[in-house]
Amino acid sequence: MSYKIAVVGATGAVGQEMLNILSERDFPASEVVALASRRSLGREVSYGDNTLKCKELDSFDFTGTDIALFAAGVDVAREFVPKATKAGVIVIDNSSAFRMEPDVPLIVPEVNADEIGGYTKRNIIANPNCSTAQMLVALKPLHDHAKIKRVVVSTYQSVSGAGKDAMDELFNQTRGIFVGDEAEKHHLTKQIAFNVIPHIDSFMRDGDTREEWKMKVETQKILDPKIEVTATCVRVPVFVGHAESINVEFENPITDDEAREILREAPGILLVDKREDGGYVTPVECVGDYATYISRLRTDPTVEHGLNMWVVSDNLRKGAALNAVQIAESLVNRYLGKAA
């Protein structure tokens, strides 16, 4: 079988990655439609060796479309996802619009693919936050072995997580500083070139940002509601690739050697953990890859059963587009019928 696929937000960084990955992974698509706002009508986007002309989302008739991948933000999702599902489309949404709604499954395929079947309640499957997705790929196999009690995570998130405008801002500020111009800011709250910003998304009343809150509540929904999570999320002057420093406290004993053996066999993970110069992965090296990389794995002696690790992934891929396509693949293989 093959399926008609719509990619909403096809001109954005995540939408373009969705198209790339659909082609790379030979997704069984009979037709792929690129959708965007009116100002992008007719703009060409790449789909493998082919190009697609963008159609206007506002006037698009979703009838006959099987699966829609949304990469267009909360406001667009809230307006157009219900229109798509009413037409019988199964929506995989990358925004935060529906993630915490109890009748919408929130999925990382390596972690909770068995929950995908919950899509039948509303024809919606939610993609988690980029920083949550890569963290849970790393934590799931360890949780199965030793049961996680508490996670303390600090993120180092690239500007692509804030969209193309933020990427342009990093480029323009960096270039400007080298020629003596003022580092103008328009989309981020502070200068990002040669700087780090401990602020992603809006502030909440308790002092956390929404990005930090998402990491907590999404972990609890996807992995285990009993896990306590505290996060500090930081924007760094990197174009693509998120990194995370994760401290994990377990209920049961686990050594760093046991953790290595578990992670070597876990889906979606590449362990690169040599205790030598360069024996670890950085964001530059993960760009364009599917894997979540784990390095710097070591025991935390300050708690009874603790580990530290460094986790890196391409946020446009595993953090967004790849995860969405993997959900679509699982949906097809488990529920809609395998490709002929």
Image (tube, rainbow, N blue to C red):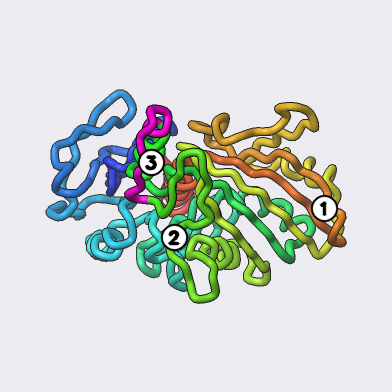
**What are the residue bounds of the magenta stretch?**
175-187
72 or 86, nearer to the observer: 72
Badge 1 amino acid: Asp
CA–CA distance in space, label 2 to label 1 = 30 Å
Image side of residue 180 versus residue 249, left or right? left
Q: Find residue 92 and name its label.
A: none
The percent position of residue 175, horizontal first and vertical second, equals 39, 30
Q: Residue at x 63, y 38 (%)?
A: 293
Q: Which residue ends up furthest to the bottom in the rendered image?
A: 205
Q: Does residue 240 show up? A: no
Q: Position of residue 56 (x, y in %)?
A: 15, 48
Q: Main secondary structure of the magenta part?
A: loop
Q: Is residue 194 left or right of residue 248?
A: left
The percent coordinates of residue 248 (x first, y second) are 74, 57
Residue drawn where x is 14% and y is 37% of the image: 42
Along the polypeptide, which appears first: circle 3 or circle 2? 3
Q: Nearer the viewer, mark 2 or mark 1?
A: 2
Q: Amino acid at mark 2?
A: Asp
Q: Residues within 10 Å of mark 3 (few under 14, many from 20)?
A: some
Residue at the disc numbered 1: 300
Residue 202 magenta:
no
User: Could you tell me how far apart the alpha carbons at marks 3 and 2 are, in whole angstroms?
Assistant: 21 Å
Q: Position of residue 313 (x, y in %)?
A: 56, 40
Give whichever of discs 3 and 1 has the lower sequence position.
3
Residue that mark 2 sits on: 201
Is 319 displayed left or right of 50 in the figure?
A: right
Q: How many marks?
A: 3
Q: Where does the N terminus fall, quadrant-wise?
A: top left
Name the mark on residue 183. Answer: 3
Q: Is residue 223 visible?
A: yes
Query: Does the residue at mark 3 contact the one at mark 1 (Cβ under 8 Å)?
Result: no
